[in-house]
Image (cartoon, helix red, strand yellow):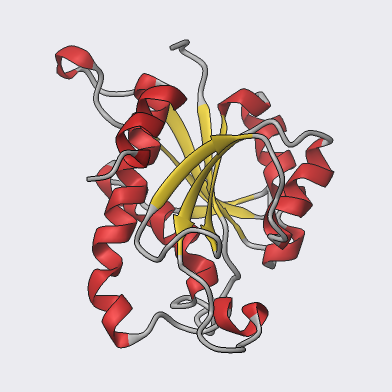
């Protein structure tokens, strides 16, 4: 892995009204990474909150690579502008961009990783791909499952996690943060092998 800085962006909507929503799980993961690095997010001129931390641990116990962890201050469907501005400010290429987001098509509680590919109807990803002119960045996909019955997915993602889900949420957020650490320290294939294998 190079000495280049990574950019890890957690997607969500701003403000207390949305803070506990399923759609905000990406932002929760970035908060966890900041706290693991004994830091917290502060306002950045790129319309985001951000901080720089060391992510993960390298073989031999050395601290992992430097990463800017950030949450756009814009609404989800306008995430592309802040992400592009952060990449420019910190000189980050798409292959060092990790976007952490909620994923309806993955069972609740599971974490998956991929590079590139479609956005699966996710407005935050669509906005980022459009702003960057490429889909070829890394994603850590945090499973929230499908909505029950005939509930509209748009309503489902903008609801808070249920009481049962909230009990499991720290484990899910922790797993996703672990996935980010493994991704930036050991690469996509190693991280996929760990998180995609049946436990």
Is residue 178 in sight in this rendering? yes
Taking the image as shown, residue 142 lies to the left or right of residue 78, namely left
User: Where does the C terminus fall, quadrant-wise?
Assistant: top left
Taking the image as shown, residue 83 lies to the left or right of residue 42, namely right
The residue under the point 26% across, 64% down is: 170
Is residue 54 in sight in this rendering? no
The residue under the point 66% across, 84% down is: 152
- Please tell me whether residue 150 is drawn above or below residue 181 in the rendered image: below
Q: How many marks?
A: 0
The residue under the point 40% across, 33% down is: 192
- Location of residue 172 (image quadrant): bottom left
User: x and y percent of residue 49 in the render?
Assistant: 54, 54
Near-viewer residue (175 or 50): 175
Near-viewer residue (119 or 14): 119
User: x and y percent of residue 124 in the render?
Assistant: 69, 58
- Please tell me whether residue 77 is drawn above or below residue 53 in the rendered image: below
User: x and y percent of residue 102 in the render?
Assistant: 52, 61
């Amino acid at each position: 892995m190079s000495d280049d800085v990574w950019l890890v962006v957690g997607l969500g909507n701003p403000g207390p009204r949305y803070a506990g929503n399923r759609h905000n799980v990406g932002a929760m993961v970035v908060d966890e990474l900041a706290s693991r690095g004994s830091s917290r997010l502060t306002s950045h001129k790129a319309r985001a909150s951000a901080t720089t931390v060391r992510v993960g641990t390298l073989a031999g116990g050395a601290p992992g690579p430097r990463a800017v962890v950030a949450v756009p201050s814009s609404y989800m469907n306008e995430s592309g502008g802040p992400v592009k501005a952060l990449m420019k400010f910190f000189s980050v290429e798409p292959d060092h961009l990790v976007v952490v987001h909620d994923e309806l098509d993955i069972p609740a509680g599971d974490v998956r990783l991929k590079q590139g590919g479609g956005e699966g109807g996710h407005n935050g990803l669509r906005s980022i791909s459009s702003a960057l002119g490429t889909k070829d960045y890394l994603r850590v996909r945090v499973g929230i499952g499908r909505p029950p019955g005939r509930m509209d997915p748009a309503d489902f993602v903008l609801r808070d996690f249920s009481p049962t889900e909230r009990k499991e949420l720290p484990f899910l957020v922790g797993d996703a943060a672990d996935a980010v650490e493994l991704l930036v320290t050991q690469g996509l294939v190693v991280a996929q092998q760990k998180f995609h294998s049946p436990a």
